[in-house]
Amino acid sequence: TVGWKMPKNQLNNENEESATSPPHRHDESVDATGVTKGRDEELSLKNKTGPKLEMPINPKPSPLTLELEEARKAMEEADLVREEKHLDMEEAQSRFIVAQGEYSDANQEYEMNKQLCYELELKQHCQWNHMYNLLLEYKETYGDTLVPHRRDDYHALGRWVANQRVFYKMHLGGKTGHIRPSRIEALNRIGFCWNLNDHRWNLAFERCKKAIEEKNGDANEIYDKTIRTWTDTNQKQYMNFIQGLPNQMTKERIKKLDEIGLVSFFRKKLEQDQTPSKKRKFSEAASSSTDLNAWWERGFTSLKTFHEKHGHCFLSLAGSRSHRQLVGSEFVDWNREQYTLFQKSGKEKEQCKLTAVLVQRLNEIDFEWDTSNEWWERGFQAVKEFRAEHGHCLLSIVDNKIVKRGRNEFVFWNREQYVLYQQTGNAKEECKLTATQVRRLDDIGFEWDHKVEVQIWWDHRFDSLCEYHSKFGDTRMDRDKASTQGKANCRLRDYVSWSRKQYKLYQKGDASSLMTEEMIEKMDRIAFEWAVSRKARPAVTPTKTYI
């Protein structure tokens, strides 16, 4: 056995088995150093715990793990920032409380100083404070600040009050400098009425509210003419508000009207008016051509009678409402509507029920197909009434503003259009004044030249200025002196101011100046002062002083 060797094939098999299988346990006597014993313990441990998993040497983390680690780091950093901001917020809150207290003290001191300044301003001697004290006297006497400027004894104060309302409106529009905030507060302190329209509307609303309460909430039972007119006007304004048309209705007014049930009343009336419309009434009355001809003849006869009485066919200009109802506004509206189709061609003209004969008959009584001429006719009738009362058409000579209201615009428009009417070419084509209108104005003695009317007005005022000069010995027209003499001298002061302004333009060679050499000679005869120095004059001390 000493020289025996294992065959090679068997040796190879043994090597393969040893490489794939665990090493065989040998006898302990083979290795006396304890190596075999440690291997046996390892083998016994492996048998107990199972096969041992082999882990990689450097394991690579997953993307989810990396994302989680980044989120944790961001959370820790955000937590640190949050703690810092929380500390800053606590410090800021403490500073805000301190600053709020300091601001309150400063604001209180500012209000005290402001009130002191306002009181000192009211104690100064100036024209505004003088008129303000007069207003306080008026309120103490009458209980309000609605000063009538048509009375001679309160004309100057009334104009001053009206100017304050204008300045306040400009102040609200952003045009500061016309009235001081201290003066606004002083007027608010006495309950000054800034808007007359709102004041009048509120008064009418209270009357209407009382009347509805007396009728147990039924607005149809109100027969007072003033209240009915007011409700009709507000109904029209409310309808325009809903339709987006120009109106004077506000949300505050609508809320007040709704409180007394007028909004629902307006809607019911609108539904009733829309149900039996004018076109439906006409279709029921004129279901056949015979009925149409009879209806048209009745309307034409009534309109012709109206034209013979008033000289025009504008029903809205008639003073009597019953007469307008007698003629029938639906007749006029129907003819104008049909005339629109009459002027067209094709299928649209075939639908027209107005014949050429009917159009000719309406033209014979000067029927106005265009409603835009109604404004001219209204102005013409007003100027015609003015001439019948005063004997001329010179509105500037008359001092009554109510008489001139609505007529000045008509006069100025006709004069501007008459300038184009006298020209030729394209300029005349732009003129909206017809030859018939020119003839009608000539018949009542209308003055086309503005300078002629200015000359007559100037001579009329010059006579009053001569009387003033003989009474006071000067032509300065001081405000305080003029205000004590009533309305006439206040208008005379405006005349003097206008003359000085036109004289300055005359000296500059401005072509727009209306001053003539004849006017200058007349002024020089009474030693008229063309330039007055603006030195401070002591104000008239009122009977009482208010603060």
Image (tube, rainbow, N blue to C red):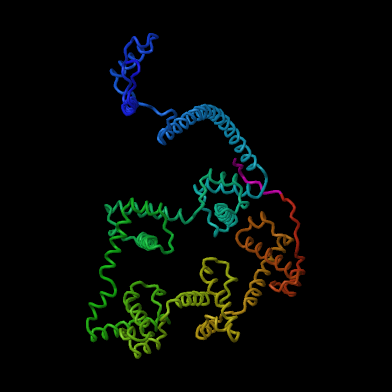
Q: Does the image show residue 154?
A: no
Q: Is residue 437 above or below residue 411?
A: below
Please identify the quadrant where the N terminus is shown: top left
Please identify the quadrant where the C terminus is shown: top right
Q: Position of residue 35 (x, y in %)?
A: 38, 12
Q: Main secondary structure of the magenta part?
A: loop
Q: Position of residue 442 (x, y in %)?
A: 55, 84
Q: Return the residue nearer the eye: 422 or 188.
A: 422
Name the residue located 30 percent from the left edge and 56 percent from the top edge: 264
Q: Is residue 157 above or below residue 459?
A: above
Q: Position of residue 386 (x, y in %)?
A: 52, 74
Q: Quadrant of residue 345?
A: bottom left
Q: Position of residue 227 (x, y in %)?
A: 36, 59
Q: Return the residue nearer the eye: 13 or 425.
A: 13
Q: Image check: 181 left or right of 312?
A: right
Q: Quadrant of residue 335?
A: bottom left
Q: Which residues are magenta?
A: 538-547
Q: Quadrant of residue 69?
A: top left
Name the residue located 57 percent from the left edge and 70 percent from the top edge: 398
